[in-house]
Amino acid sequence: MTTVSKPKPLVEHFEAGLDAPICLTWELTYACNLACSHCLSSSGRRDPRELSTAECEGVIDELQRMQVFYVNIGGGEPTVRSDFWHLLDYATSRDVGVKFSTNGIKIDAEAARRIAANSYIDVQVSLDGATPDVNDAVRGLGSYATAEKALQHLHDAGVSPKLSVVCTRQNIGQLDAFKALADRFGAQLRLTRLRPSGRGADVWDELHPTQAQQRELYDWLVAHGEGVLTGDSFFHLAAYGDALPGLNLCGAGRVVCLIDPVGDVFACPFAIHDQFLAGNVRDAGFQTVWQQSALFAQLREPQSGGACSGCSAYDACRGGCMAAKFFTGLPLDGPDPECVKGHGEAALAGVRAIPAASGDHSHKGGVRGMPSRGGPVPIQLLASRPCNESPVSLV
Amino acid sequence: MPVTADPVLDRAYDVSPRVAIRPESFGALLYHFGTRRLSFLKDPLLLATVRALADAPTARAACVSAGVSEAQLPAYARALNTLITTDMLRERP
């Protein structure tokens, strides 16, 4: 009789961290033509310390050596960097695929043809309303029209883009309309979660989905299966029952991370704050930060369920999103603010201290159709960037 | 013990040209730059098998050279099948 030792489940390997990220998000610039009310990175103005072209190439060389198969490029609006297309070519010619997020401002017919000619590029056009009124209230006047024009150029060039939507209280009722819009442009729909990060902290209370809407969203996602992407965004909803497609774990500092425009490495795209800063690529390179930072080592330690450990759903939701807890002032070992069991609401009602933002590149004077930061808040929200792309197949 | 009869085992395969393999302690990550699909090989022996395919006349020979036992063959044939249907592996004429 042979005894076969059962291998450790894959999820435990991921929780303990890999030698290189599976994928990562890289925000190339804080410059943006828009001023979305929910911007994760509080973008607007370029930072004079942003990585130079040569420094970006150095990061790409490292990613190639580490066999990071693809990066999610965002910003800011990454396409406003004058070396944007060069960096795309540089990465994709070195086996580092690129998925980039854009509001569409630079996607004209020529850009669309350029994207079509490179099979290592994916493009995600952000839109947070299926109608101009809902979208523009959050992303700014005219932003719906810009995105629609970009989608048309991409469609005409034979590119199948992704239509990337941050789910809000104002647009959950438009899920079918988003799907129809995506179908119209031959696009794949991608839904992600609103995070209270960056300027998102200012508007989260008004924009985040209600409990009833979370259920509606979950049922809709289950009904649409792998046909709709979520970037593993909604693993906290797994507590409703079946897990959604994806890895269903918090990958922060374990299998994903974020490089910001000045080279700072953060645990995840939703955690641009000193508390989650692991290091800077300018010091000893990205690989050193990834493999040796004290913060990442700590995130790779086994985590306790804390206040959630007695909950029947803990194995499914794993306590939810670290960044969502942090930026709403909740303890990291307690429930997610949008816990489907309602524990988040109770925690939010208690005493909590919202952490002060540690970086802000918002436009100082405001942008057409949008208030400047600190001004009146209409309805509002940003483009969250994804990582672990579903479908993930386990062999 | 009966010999495992799975047609997959008697054909020859290569890793698809647009697939990259990244070895990991648990096995490997496979990424297909065409389909954008990421797969996980949850077992170092499966990785050894996949790597042996290029120089083996059949998938069965690759399994044997990697050290897969007769008893394990059906499971490995199923795993290879999954990789074939997702275009991670392609039949070599």
Image: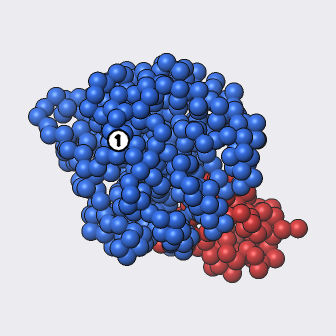
Measured as percent of width and height from the top left, residue A334 is found at 22, 43
Mark 1: amino acid: Ser
Question: What chain is the red one?
Answer: B
| Relative side of A265 to A229, left or right | left
Query: Who's the residue at 56% across and 55% down the image?
Result: A82
Which residue does the numbered mark 1 point to in the structure image? A362
Colour displayed for chain A in the image of the structure: blue
| Relative side of A110 to A146, left or right | right
Measured as percent of width and height from the top left, residue A372 is found at 33, 32
Query: Who's the residue at 53% across and 57% down the image?
Result: A71
Above/below status of B72 relative to A372: below
- Most distant residue in the right direction: B93
From the viewer's side, name the closer residue of A127 and A332.
A127
Query: Who's the residue at 26% across and 42% down the image?
Result: A327
The chain containing the residue under callout 1 comes to: A
Measured as percent of width and height from the top left, residue A305 is found at 24, 49
